[in-house]
């Protein structure tokens, strides 16, 4: 079997784990700034599960996670680690990479027209998490999420809790998920957003609307991972 044939098979299996998200709109809010704004969402694909340690190792030959398990979500990854994974997966499956690094490796350019894998925007993430519902969660917390009250101080295999109505698992709890967006350049510089809550968070933090942020090149922790997205065209 040739490398090209292996790549094609890999892409097919990965595409089987992607959910088609319909177009729509979502109202976001920033409680710190007391602001609200509406974002139009174009159709795109989002993975059913956070990236697992098994998939991350298959692509990168590394597993930085504190809690080990093939089906556990990968964690302890920076935002940059996440987009490098997206680029690597795109290359292996013969798609166009979404991210380009400058010569000094400091500036990262995003190509919104590329057909490769990427991180979701926070608007796409929240829209997908809510899946047409209006509340702060798509179900009873203990039914849909691993959080401080039930996690026993560890991550868990993906897909064990109930999915939302669009078939997405672990959108809340287990691990927070990096999104593509910069939070606020004026106050926080290059800090990127992450969403969803993690295994060690109290109930009040595990909501579809909760926004957090940190440094894209330095910050990594054992309750922060990511999920891949892809343009639908």
Image: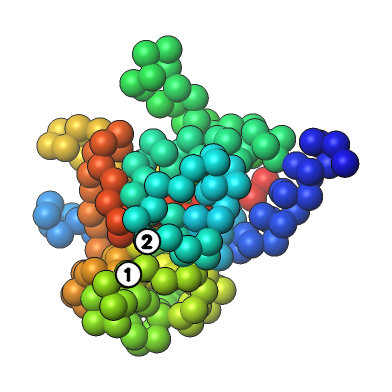
Picture layout, residue 26 above or below residue 55: below
Picture layout, residue 31 above or below residue 158: above
Q: Which residue is mark 1?
A: 154
Discs 1, 2 touching: Cβ within 8 Å: yes
* Foreground of the two, 125 or 133: 125
As helix, strand or loop, the secondary structure at mark 2 comes to loop
Marks 1 and 2, how far apart in space? 7 Å
Q: Residue at x 25, y 42 (%)?
A: 219
Q: How many marks?
A: 2
Q: Residue at x 12, y 37 (%)?
A: 187
Which numbered disc covers residue 194? none
Sequence-wise first label, 1 or 2: 2
Image coordinates of residue 4 in percent, x first then y, are 81, 36
Q: Is residue 192 left or right of residue 80?
A: left
Asked whether the viewer can see residue 39, the reply is no
Image coordinates of residue 103 in percent, x first then y, are 42, 12
Which numbered disc covers residue 67? 2
Instruction: Quadrant for residue 27, please give it.
Output: bottom left
Image coordinates of residue 50 in percent, x first then y, are 48, 60
Q: Is residue 216 left or right of residue 162?
A: left
* Foreground of the two, 162 or 115: 162
Q: Residues within 10 Å of mark 2 (few under 14, many from 20)?
A: some
As helix, strand or loop, the secondary structure at mark 1 comes to loop
Asked whether the viewer can see residue 78, the reply is yes
Q: Residue at x 27, y 72 (%)?
A: 153
Image coordinates of residue 217 in percent, x first then y, are 30, 34
Picture layout, residue 68 above or below residue 78: below
Q: Is residue 105 left or right of residue 147?
A: right
């Amino acid at each position: 079997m040739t490398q090209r044939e292996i790549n094609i098979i890999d892409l097919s299996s990965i595409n089987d784990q992607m959910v088609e998200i319909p177009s729509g709109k979502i109202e976001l809010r920033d409680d710190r700034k007391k602001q609200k704004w509406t974002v139009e969402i174009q159709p795109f694909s989002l993975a059913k599960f956070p990236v697992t340690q098994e998939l991350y190792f298959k692509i990168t030959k590394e597993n930085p996670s504190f809690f080990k398990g093939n089906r556990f979500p990968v964690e302890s990854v920076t935002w940059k680690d996440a987009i490098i994974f997206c680029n690597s997966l795109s290359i292996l499956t013969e798609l166009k990479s979404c991210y380009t690094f400058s010569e000094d490796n400091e500036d990262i350019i995003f190509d919104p027209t590329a057909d490769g894998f990427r991180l979701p925007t926070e608007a796409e993430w929240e829209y997908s998490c809510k899946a047409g519902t209006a509340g702060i969660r798509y179900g009873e917390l203990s039914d849909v999420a691993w959080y401080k009250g039930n996690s026993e101080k560890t991550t868990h295999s993906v897909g064990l809790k109930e999915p939302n109505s669009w078939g997405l698992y672990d959108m809340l709890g287990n691990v927070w998920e990096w999104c593509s967006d910069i939070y606020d350049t004026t106050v926080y510089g290059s800090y990127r957003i992450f969403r969803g809550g993690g295994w060690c968070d109290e109930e009040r933090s595990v909501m579809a609307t909760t926004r957090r942020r940190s440094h894209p090149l330095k910050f990594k922790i054992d309750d922060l991972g990511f999920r891949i997205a892809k343009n639908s065209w």
